[in-house]
């Protein structure tokens, strides 16, 4: 890291590196809490979702901390996976005065468009450490096939 | 404010070489003490580290390493570990703090020392 004397932007000579690092700082600040405050303000929750693929399956992982299995609904509609549910968080009446309330409480839903056709009858789901993992076997037509050359 | 939660400054956080995600928390206070809940999806008991130093409590949650043998098509989750620092109310009896981890949510119970709890005095 180098230390350079601060100069009034308008008066200094052209300094592309200084401007770039300044820009980078601005951008870092923007991404510090990407929409974190915004979503809280709107009081909605859109759980983070990851999508994976291996030869035979599409795997979806969703971050849903602090729920009960029974409160999570997973359904499949025409190539889209819908995860929804309701998270009930006990409120101050039971626990005393609230100092901080950042956790979302209420109904949420999230849909994920699947990249290939899946076999809806063989979908499996598990919930561990606050992460929901859904394994969707690809339909036979969607699996990669080896074509023999004659 | 007498809260347990006094997050350390963001500047300091930025200076660290490793980046962390700050977990969302709920904090309640009643006459017996405080209850702190922190959301750390993907963290289990083994990945949790709680340290107390000079009235400061640091919570670190390390995510289990991904052992999925599959290609990532799309990722929204952040891979960084969780970390957040809280300043403790001096009324808390730090020797009696207890922790529980359930489905990615850490629940800490921080009881107040006996002498600060409100007490009813019976008149004889």
Image (spheres, rainbow, N blue to C red):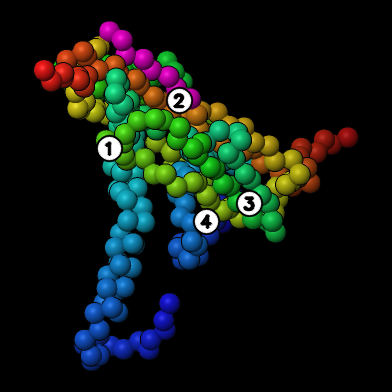
Could you tell me which residue is drawn at 48 percent across and 34 percent down? B42
On the image, numbered disc 1 is attached to which residue?
Answer: B74
Could you tell me which residue is drawn at 32 percent across and 14 percent down? A123
Which numbered disc, 1 or 3, marks the residue that appears first in the sequence? 3
Q: Within the image, what quadrant is residue A18 found in?
A: bottom left
On the image, numbered disc 3 is attached to which residue?
Answer: B57
Q: Within the image, what quadrant is residue A85 found in?
A: top left
Crowd class of label 2 (few under 14; some 14 to 19; many from 20; radius 10 Å): many
Q: Do circles 4 and 3 both sit on a common chain?
A: yes
Distance in Å between CA atoms under marks 1 and 2: 24 Å
Looking at the rendered structure, the secondary structure element under dot 2 is loop
On the image, numbered disc 4 is attached to which residue?
Answer: B7
Looking at the rendered structure, the secondary structure element under dot 3 is strand
Q: Do circles 3 and 2 both sit on a common chain?
A: no
Chain letter of the residue carrying label 4: B
Crowd class of label 3 (few under 14; some 14 to 19; many from 20; radius 10 Å): some
Residue at the far top: name it: A121
Q: Magenta region: which residues?
A: A121-128
Distance in Å between CA atoms under marks 1 and 3: 35 Å
Residue A51, position as x, y percentages in the image: 30, 32
Task: Report the quarter where the N terminus of chain A lies.
Answer: bottom left
On the image, numbered disc 2 is attached to which residue?
Answer: A67
């Amino acid at each position: 890291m180098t230390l350079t004397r601060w100069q009034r932007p308008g008066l200094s000579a052209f300094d592309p590196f200084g401007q770039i690092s300044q820009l980078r700082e601005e951008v870092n600040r923007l991404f510090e809490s990407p929409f974190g405050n915004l979503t809280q303000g709107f009081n909605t929750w859109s759980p983070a979702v990851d999508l994976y693929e291996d030869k035979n399956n599409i795997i979806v992982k969703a971050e849903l901390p602090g729920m009960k299995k029974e409160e999570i609904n997973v359904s499949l509609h025409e190539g889209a996976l819908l995860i929804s549910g309701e998270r009930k968080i006990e409120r101050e009446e039971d626990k005393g005065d609230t100092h901080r309330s950042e956790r979302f409480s209420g109904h949420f839903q999230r849909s994920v468009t699947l990249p290939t056709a899946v076999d809806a009858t063989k979908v499996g789901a598990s919930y561990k450490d606050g992460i929901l993992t859904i394994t969707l076997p690809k339909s036979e037509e969607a699996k990669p096939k080896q074509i023999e050359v004659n | 404010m007498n809260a347990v939660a006094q997050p350390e400054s963001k500047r300091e956080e930025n200076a660290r070489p490793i980046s962390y995600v700050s977990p969302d928390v709920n904090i309640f206070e009643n006459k017996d003490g405080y209850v702190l809940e922190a959301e750390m999806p993907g963290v289990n008991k083994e990945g949790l580290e709680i340290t107390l130093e000079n009235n400061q409590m640091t919570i670190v949650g390390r995510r289990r390493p991904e052992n999925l043998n599959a290609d990532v098509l799309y990722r929204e989750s952040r891979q960084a570990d969780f970390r957040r620092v809280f300043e403790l109310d001096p009324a808390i009896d730090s020797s009696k703090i207890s922790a529980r981890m359930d489905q990615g949510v850490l629940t800490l119970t921080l009881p107040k020392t006996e002498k600060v709890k409100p007490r009813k005095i019976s008149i004889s």
